[in-house]
Amino acid sequence: MKITADQIQSTNKPREVSHSREFNFLAENLEKKGLNVEQLIQKLQDFQIAIPSWALGTGGTRFGRFSGGGEPATLIQKIQDIGILHTLNRSSDSVSLHIPWDIPKDYDAILQAAAEVEIGFDAVNSNTFQDQADQSLSYKFGSLANQDKSIRELAIEHNKEVIRIGEKLGSKALTVWLADGSSFPGQHSFRKALQNTHECLQEIYQDLPIDWKMLIEYKPYEPYFYSTVIQDWGTSFLLANKLGEKAYTLVDLGHHLPNTNIEQIVATLMTEGKLGGFHFNDSKYGDDDLTVGSIKPYQLFLIFNELVAGFEETSNPAPAWMIDASHNLKDPLEDLLQSVEAIKLAYAQALIVDQNSLHAAQASHDVAIAQEILQDAYRTDLRPLVREAIRQSGGAISPIQTYRDLKVRETLIKERGKDSKASGL
Ligand code: PSV
Ligand code: MN
Ligand code: MN
C-alpha cells in the first residue's frame, strides 16, 4: 500500500476551512507575543523522530499478544509501514533497526525500499538480552557483565557485527541497552559486573567508525529485579565519560523509577554535553511503553523545555530522537501517529516559552511568575500550529483521520493477511 499526494490533498480538503480559521487565530496571537510563526513552523518541520523496527507490530506482554492483522512480516514491509507514517505526517524519516530481529539479507533491496519511501537508517540496536537459535553460549546470567570471558567475547563480537551492519546502511550510532543484572542479593559482584561491562564497552568503542556515536541506555529494573548493571543515568554517564567523546547517555523516558525528575537529568546531561539520544514513550508505573504524552504530558513539556533551553545555551550535539513504545491494544501505526503528534506538541509548547522573562523571573526569585510563564506556554493550544507545519510539508492536516479515511489498516490486512505478525518483542 502506498499513499499518494493526491489522496492526502483530497482528505485534507474538507478540513481546510476550519483548520485555516484555527491556525490564523493562533498565529495572530503568537505574533502579538513577539513570536515568529514561520520560524516555529520550520523548527517543527525539521524535527524528525526515528521509528524502531520493533514498534510496527502489536506489542506483547508475557500474558498474551493480540495482533490486529496486516502486520509487517519482513523488514521491507516494516520500512513500507514507516513510509506510510512519513507520508501522513512528514515527521519520521528514519528507521532504527534491532539486530538480529531485523538483519537485512539483501542490502540493495533494503536500501532501495528505504529510498523509495524517503527513509534513512538511524541508530542500530544490539541484542544481548536473548539467546539466538544457533547460539552456543547463553546470556542467561548476563552478556557484557558476565563472569565468563567467552560469553563476554560473544557479546562483544555481536556488537561489532551490528556496527558492520549499520555501516552498510548508513547508520551513525550504536545503541546499547543491556539487560544484565541480578535478581537476588549475592548473585553477583556489583563491582566485577560493572568493571566487565566497562572493559567490554571499551573494546566495542574502539571498533566504532570515526563519525559514529555509542548511545548507552540505562534502566533501573526488568528483566532482573534486584540490580541492573547500568541502572541509572549516573552509571551510563560514568561509562560514557570513561569511554570517550563518541560515547553518550541515552534517556529512555520509561526507564526511571516513578516520580524521577527526568527534566533535571536532561538539563544535567546537556550541561555536560553528554545527552546522545532519547527514547520517547509514556508510563504510569514502570517501563509501560504507552503512547507518548498519554499519561504525563506536562512532564513531557517540562522535558522539552529543558531540551529547547539546552539547544540554545549548551554545546550538546543534536541528540538522536526515537519512539520506543509497543503495547498490546492499539493499531501500532495509529499509536505512532499519536506519539509523534504528542512529541511535536510538547516541542511547540517549549518553543513558545519566553526564556528571557523566565530568566528574569528566576533572577528576581519571582517563583509565581516563573510558574506562570511555563504554564502559559503549556496551556496554549498549539495543535493548529503542529497541523500547519505538517500540512505545509505535504502531510495530512489530521494524519490519524486520513489514515482511517484511506482505510490503511483494512488494505494492509487484505494485502498481508489477518494473521501476518511482525517479528520482535
Ligand atoms: C527494553 O526496556 C527496551 O525497551 C529498551 O528500552 C531498548 O531500547 C529496547 O527494549 C530495545 O532493545
Ligand atoms: Mn529504549
Ligand atoms: Mn524500555
Image (cartoon, rainbow, N blue to C red):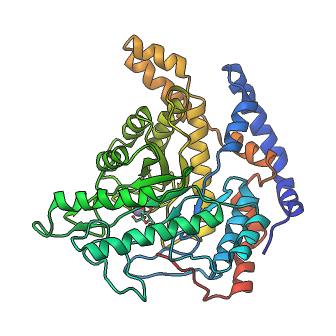
Q: Residue furthest left?
A: 186
Which residue is at a point 41% across and 57% down the rendered structure image? 283
User: What percent of the width, then of the height, locates residue 26?
Assistant: 71, 32
Asked whether residue 94 is in view, the answer is yes
Q: Is residue 170 above or below residue 320?
A: below
User: What percent of the width, then of the height, locates residue 41?
Assistant: 72, 37
Q: Give the quarter the ligand 1 occupies.
A: bottom left
User: What percent of the width, then of the height, locates residue 48?
Assistant: 65, 50
Asked whether residue 127 is in view, the answer is no
212 relative position to 416: left or right: left
Which residue is at a point 78% across and 33% down the rendered structure image? 24
Q: Is residue 240 above or below residue 176?
A: above
Q: Nearer the viewer, residue 57 or 79?
A: 79
Q: Residue 349 is drawn in which quadrant?
A: top right
Q: Quadrant of the N terminus?
A: bottom right
Q: Nearer the viewer, residue 337 or 253?
A: 253
User: What percent of the width, then of the height, locates residue 250?
Assistant: 43, 51
120 relative position to 318: left or right: right
